[in-house]
Amino acid sequence: VAQTVSFGVVQQPAIVAHRGASTDRPEHTIGAYELALKEGADGLECDIRLTRDGEIVCVHDRTLLRTSNGRGTVSALTLEELRKFDYGSWHGYREPAELLLLDQLLELVKGTDVQLFVETKHPVRYRNEVERKLAEALKRHGLASQIVMMSFSATAVKVFREQVPDVRTVLLLDRLGRLRSGALPSFADYTGPGVHLLRNDPGYVDRARRAGHETYVWTVDTAEDVALCRDLGVRYLATNAPANTRRLLTAN
Ligand code: G3P
Ligand code: CA
């Protein structure tokens, strides 16, 4: 079985907290990310969208329905309107929480060695405005080496790369399609297959490595999936439960 080896030591995948420690805290809240850091996550993942007035907020879904007590579409509301809602009480943890801005996450990782994986949502419909705004925010914060930009849209990754060539990028994959061979487009540094793809085709990670790149795999929470990613030598593993995944990774 292929594994990443340096100086005789098997390198474990880096643990990326998917939407924060989102099993135990409401996703995309500052509490979820603070818990992830406390649990020793190597990286944090977030999804971003633009508000009607062009601010970058961390919300996964197009609408507010699932993760807040509000209603409506994120892109149709202003920051002020979005801030009126509670983003915490829907979760089993049942504590109110505020809307999270990308700026807050950039401040959270500043001065640490934690990497922030930022996924842009619905970029094409908004003419890649979210990628351009993300590029501006990163230039403002000066955090290029700690940030990884991600998208399922090849166009989005390409547009972003043109704006800030020194920030690493992941082309996310929900099917391998024409990249099955391990090929990597020139504007991406990693591919990001869902773990379901590796269950069917574990050889992909090795093909990608032979083609010259490492893989970011999402979303890895079960003992079987964690063992699969570890044994294949996946570089980054996104999980909703960082502490439990660390425990599974280090268990025999
Ligand atoms: O980390 C990539 C993964 O988050 C992509 O799927 O729907 O959870 O954003 P989704
Ligand atoms: Ca995501």
Image: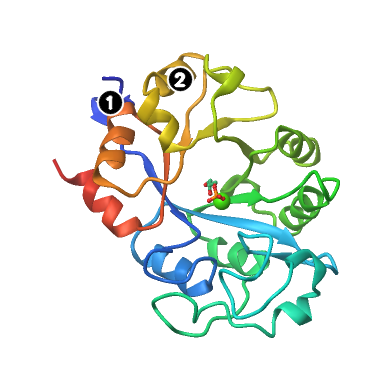
Res 82 quadrant in image: bottom right
Against 222, residue 94 (above or below) is below
Is residue 72 left or right of 2 when viewed as pictured?
right
Q: Position of residue 128 (x, y in %)?
A: 81, 46
Which secondary structure, mark 2? helix
Can residue 175 be seen here? The reply is yes
Which secondary structure, mark 1? loop
Asked if disc 2 is less than 8 Å from ligand 1, the answer is: no
Give the position of the N terminus as an image quadrant. Answer: top left
**Tag shown at residue 209:** 2
Q: Residue beneath label 1, please?
A: 7
Is residue 21 left or right of 129 when viewed as pictured?
left
Mark sitting earlier along the chain (2/1): 1
Please name which of the two marks, 2 or 1, marks the residue nearer to the observer: 2
Res 36 quadrant in image: bottom left
* Residue that appears at 61% across and 59% down: 60
Asked if disc 1 is less than 8 Å from ligand 1, the answer is: no
Rounded to the nearest angstrom, the CA distance separating label 2 from label 1 is 18 Å
Extreme residue in the left direction: 252
Please tell me which residue lies in front, 120 or 165. 120
Amino acid at dot 1: Phe
